[in-house]
Amino acid sequence: MMPTLFMLPLSLCLSASLSASDTLSLSGESGITAVEKKQSPATWTLQDCIDYARENNLQVKSSQLDRQSADVELKTAKASRWPSLSFGSTQGFSNGSKWNEGNGNFVTDPQYTGTYNISASVTLYNGGKVNNTIKQQKVLNQVSRFLVEKAQNDIELAVTASFLEVLYALESLYTDSAVLQNSLAQWEKAGIQYEEGAIRQSEYARIQAQYESDNYNYVVSQNNLRNRKLELKQLLELGPDERLEVAVPDTKALDLNRTLPAAADIYENALQNMPEIKASELRVSASEYAQKVARAQMIPSLRLSASVGTGYYTSGPFTFLNQMHNNLNENLSLGITIPIYQNRTAKSSVETAKINTEQALVDLQSQQKQLLKEIEQAWQDANSAQSRFLAASRQHEAASLSYSLVTEEYQVGGKSLVDVLTEKSTYLSSVEEMLKAKYQAVLSMRLLDFYMNRPAAF
């Protein structure tokens, strides 16, 4: 009878997971490679990835620059309260002829002139336009800060999903590596048995084909892991020469079957915490201030102006300093502007501002509806993921038991090699399905925790 060749170690394939501080070391592009566990001094936890991406992702940086622009706009609005001050000067040269009564002839009279003035003006009243513009800019400044937070939240979710994809690829590779090593041992032992005449050539060929199939799956898993790591590196904006080794958390400690909070409770919590909702609410306030700014165009404005000026010319009878002193003049004026007819520009501005306010209200309602839709879908996904994980776990237990029993029967001649290979395929499919279900459940429940403003559990 043929010794046990097809019974995979359940400790390798059943759990198919790495400890929290281990990384998978691989060498070569194909074929058999050893699986080594070693402590890595530079591994990325999920929180490391999130913190790094929130600071270095280009989309986040772009939103931070928008926030800086909003800060500048606010400073500009505040500065409009204060008087403006300017200095002006004109320098001129003229050359012409004039009648000289002394000799009765026209004589050339070149002349250089210079004028200098300092002027200042300040708006005393303009219907509250300045104050309302400042208030509007303050609100828009807050909007920009919430948009930065939203960009950071978006990248956090993307990094979390990508990180879990890497973990899934790691566990799949670990499983395929264990399967491949076991398959190699089977093939090598079958080769000895074939040479001794203990098994037929067809049976040996099937074992060899199974090994090649397992080797192919292992190579596919290697490439899949590289692709998942590349996607995570791109989210982190890491360079091509920078290595990325992830720290594998203990996902066994996660309670994937815990009771989910009610979708209504999640929604109410999200309304209070999600930055996109707060930004939409503030846009409504900004639009209301914009209406007041537009109405100010219909109200008379009052402006105070003052100036000091002097000048000199070379043909004058006095010296430069004397002329600058004698020509000194001061001016103070109070001006009022009363809008009478503005080609409907002011009225159109008010109507447009009202429409923008109504649009902002619609956008707020749309954001709220979209958030509710996302939460309901996330809750349904989490509920489905829990059920799928439970079913996949049971399927895996059944497949594991069936594979063990068929292998034992094969050893005593009760089952054929085809039966064993079929059960092995079913068993490995159950391992793959359980891994998919597990990480889908982890991601779905993490999304619900995110909406509840809870930190990551790992």
Image: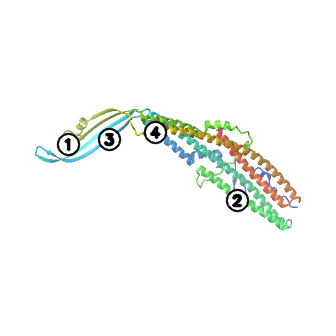
Identify residue for label 2.
219
Q: CA distance from mark 4 to mark 2?
A: 65 Å
The quarter of the picture where residue 219 lies is bottom right
Q: Which SS class for mark 2?
A: helix
Nearer to us of marks 3 and 2 is: 3
User: Which residue type does callout 4 highlight?
Assistant: Ser
Residue 87 in the figure: left or right of residue 129: left
Q: CA distance from mark 3 to mark 2?
A: 77 Å
Closer to the chain start, of discs 4 and 1, is: 1
Q: How is the image coloured?
A: rainbow
Q: CA distance from mark 3 to mark 1?
A: 22 Å
Q: CA distance from mark 4 to mark 1?
A: 54 Å
Residue 23 in sight in this render: no
Q: Which SS class for mark 4?
A: helix
Closer to the chain start, of discs 2 and 1, is: 2
Closer to the chain start, of discs 3 and 1, is: 3
Q: CA distance from mark 2 to mark 1?
A: 96 Å
- Quarter of the N terminus within the rendering: bottom right
Count the marks: how many? Answer: 4
User: Which residue type does callout 1 highlight?
Assistant: Ser
The residue closer to the viewer here, 47 or 289, is 289
Q: CA distance from mark 4 to mark 3?
A: 35 Å
- Number of the label disc, if any, that sits on residue 133: none
Residue 227 in sight in this render: yes
Identify residue for label 4.
349
Closer to the chain start, of discs 3 and 2, is: 3
- Measured as percent of width and height from the top left, residue 49 is found at 62, 47
Q: Residues within 10 Å of mark 1 (few under 14, many from 20)?
A: few
The residue closer to the viewer here, 240 or 432, is 432
Identify residue for label 3.
88
User: Which residue type does callout 2 highlight?
Assistant: Val
- Number of the label disc, if any, that sits on residue 315: 1
